[in-house]
Amino acid sequence: MSDDDFLRVTDVSKWYGDEKVLEDVSFEMDRGDVTVLIGPSGSGKSTMLRCVNRLAEAQEGSILLDGEEVLSPDLDVDELRREVGMVFQGFNLFAHLTAVGNVALGPRRVLGLSETAARERAEEQLERVGLADQLDSYPAELSGGQQQRVGIARALAMEPKLMLFDEPTSALDPELIGEVLEVMHGLVEEGMTMLVVTHEMSFAREVADEIVFLDDGRVVERGPPEQLFDRPEEERTGRFLERIASHD
Amino acid sequence: MASATRPATVRERVADADRSVGRLLLVAAGALFWGWLVASWVNRWLGGVLVPVGQPLIPAGAVETAFAAIPGFAAYAADAAFVVELTPELSRGTWLTVVITAVSLVLGFFIAVPLAVTRVYGRFSAWLSLAYTELLRGTPLLAQLFVLYYGLNLASYVPGAFSGVFARDVVWVAILGFTLNGAAYQAEYIRGALESVEEGQITAGRAIGLSKLETIYYVVLPQGLRYAIPSWTNEFVYLIKYSSLAAFITVPELYYRADQIASETFRYTLIFVVTGVTYLALVLTASKLMERVEERVSIPGLGADSEE
Amino acid sequence: MSDPGTLALAAAASVATDLPAGDGLAALAAAGGSADWWVVGEPADWGFVRRNADYLGVGALLTIGLTFASILLGFVVGFPAGAVEVYGDGLLKRAVSTVGIVLRGTPIVVILIVMYFVVGVPQINLGVASISSAMTAGILGLGLRSAAYQSQIFRASLSSVDEGQLEAGRSIGLSRFEAVRYVVVPQALRRSIPGFQNEFTIVLKDTSIVFAIGLAELLTRGYDLFSEQTTAVLEVILFISAIYFVLTFTTNRALDYLGDRYAIPEGESA
Ligand SMILES: Nc1ncnc2c1ncn2[C@@H]1O[C@H](COP(=O)(O)OP(=O)(O)OP(=O)(O)O)[C@@H](O)[C@H]1O
Ligand SMILES: [Mg+2]
């Protein structure tokens, strides 16, 4: 742990009513790192991710992003979200806008780019995710994999310094998962800092610098993929990995 | 069973043919109706360029002779002439009906959107909005018009800038009444539509850094308002029909003029059948118009064709 | 008013000219200046309303009676009409749907006037009581218009019942009519409750429009009262509006209750 960690999450706790869904969660990332959160359903992975861009409010602890306290009440959350991109399990594309419209909305309305500049940027980003030929399609006219790639382009268009992925492939048919993972691979190679929740273990093993295993809102174990996947120290980690493997 | 199927398909084919003939007739009737209306309006505005103001576009006498000449129609010749004589007054009334409806609908919309938004996303203001819509939807429109006209005597408070736009200031009272009433109904439709926009759309908007208001404006409203179009059509039709109640606060719109002529001539049957048909034509036009609007703004995957 | 129908509009104009200018807003403004700022109007005029509460109460009863009679007529005619639009074919279906379009596209006030003057319904004598021709015209006008709307409610709910339900009925040996009667209709009726609720309050509010044919229901009685004492206009109208509001509000809550009570447990429609 060094003082110049890019993202440092320290002892974060969160309650929904009386239910404690995160308990003293800590981990940290350097610039360009890829960290993968894994854990059983309901363990708090999504909640942890959403605390980072304040779509959920953590009650205790600290999240330092680039030296700034994310949880500070004075922080401008819209500003924070400009710098942190998010990709959703259910895509959440704006249903009334075309692919280009979806990607351009943020640059146009949040960054204040001109109509043409925003469109140009949107086209660039869609090209980057391999959708140059679907610019004017509406979400309903795209396959799930294509929709999710628009979702990624939409986040990238804000030129974020951190990307959050919440199970980006788990709503997809198996044959469509590959194209999304390929795009994410590309981002890793470009050096994007990424915090990813996924059940794609082979993807995690390939790209992650660190795996964080959450259970019941607590970090049970964390470490580089080789260690966590091949020689887990905790019994619970092993059991979880076995269960996942038997489903594949 | 099999024999029952065959005649049915034949019948259907006949029905199809009938229907397209029917549609053609409807379109022709619509064109005639609007052509006549617009021509009478223009004639009046330009001070009688076609025929003297107050005269029917076609002389009633000519219509009577024409009818008398057609075998089988001779018995209706006098009635036809009478209807033609009615047309200048009815077209005048229809103008006011159209204006009152259109203005109230649009003004009501601009009140309804904030009402609906606060109802869905507000806290204290949600209660205010609820109280407003419940009160206006829970009492008769005619009683509301009476409150404004007889109770508050608003006709004598019309601001100078508005006064004189219409021949009678009371038209503004009617517009105010329909706007306030229509806003409550429209707000209810729009609220339903906003609530049918998925939660994830808002989350996604917030996640790219739009503020809550921006998300509502750029993401929720464009979708919600499209969902609201079919019920907006209902509201349009409702206003056309209920604008007739303005007659009871002395606004000289279509129904008022019809009633006046009827009480002078005692030809209630003919006059009100013609009046009814005029309203029907306005209503059918409005629903066709809104169908077109819906087609124009439709987006794949949103609203009616979302099942595809 | 000897011939209230023809005179309704003329009377409207004359009362307007009788009104002291600025009376209404002045009453509000005066209230604003007094100690009891929340009281709209004058105590004396509220006293006038109180003295005539019985008279208005009878009007409210007439309003309720008119509503029930019209809704009932609307159901008796509207339900078969809806069924014809779903299951019928040919001329009958087209006739029914055309009449429906005409009734739904014409202002209720025109329909009422046509019933009153054109159809010229006679006074109905029942021996003990007689129903005035205005009342008959009111029930016919409101009832038939309501039938046109109720037919749409039932058409929608009948066609929303899954095709498989009808087939299942036929498969156990019911005739087509029996399958519709015993399988589809019970489900459809329950699904009609929300639309029916809407229709009920619309009819209730629209009974006020029989003002046009001079039937002495709530609004007409209010009108007659404030024509008599023109300083009490606002008080009278607010009072009758409150009665209407209570009526629609309780109707809605009652039908909500009915809806919950007879709701079919979920899963049935799937
Ligand atoms: N908005 C909310 N209100 C109340 N409880 C919530 C809310 N969101 C999540 N929870 C609860 O918090 C806990 C953690 O949820 P979370 O969605 O973070 O889990 P997860 O690890 O992402 O699960 P999954 O793999 O199913 O997505 C769960 O018990 C959930 O029920
Ligand atoms: Mg999750």
Image (cartoon, rainbow, N blue to C red):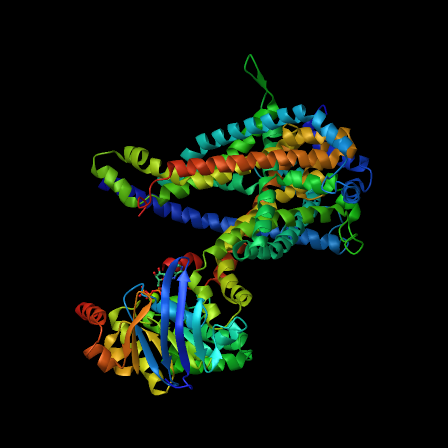
Q: Nearer the viewer, residue B265 or B161?
A: B161
Question: x, y (%) of residue B30?
Answer: 56, 50
Among the 4 quarters of the image, the one containing residue A100: bottom left
- Residue C151 as seen in the image, left or right of residue C128: left
Q: Is residue C61 above or below residue B120?
A: above
| Relative to C120, residue A62 above or below | below
Closest to the observer: C157 or B215? B215
Which residue is situated farthest in the top direction here? C127
Between B140 and B39, which is closer to the camera in this rendering? Answer: B140
- Asked if A5 appears above or below A240 in the picture, the reply is below
Residue A27 in sight in this render: yes
Rendered-image quadrant of the C terminus of chain A: bottom left
Q: Is residue C221 rendered to the left or right of residue A113?
A: right
Spot occupied by residue A216 in the image (x, y as percentages of width and height): 31, 65
Residue B83 in the image: state x and y as whole percent: 65, 40
Report the label total.
0
> Which image quadrant shows ligand 2?
bottom left
Query: Considering the image in quadrants, where does the N terminus of chain A appear?
Result: bottom left
Give the left or right position of residue C170, taking residue B303 as reference.
left
Point 58% across, 17% down: residue: C130
Residue A136 is at least partly visible in this image: no
Q: Is residue C218 above or below residue B91?
A: above
Q: Position of residue B174 (x, y in %)?
A: 69, 46
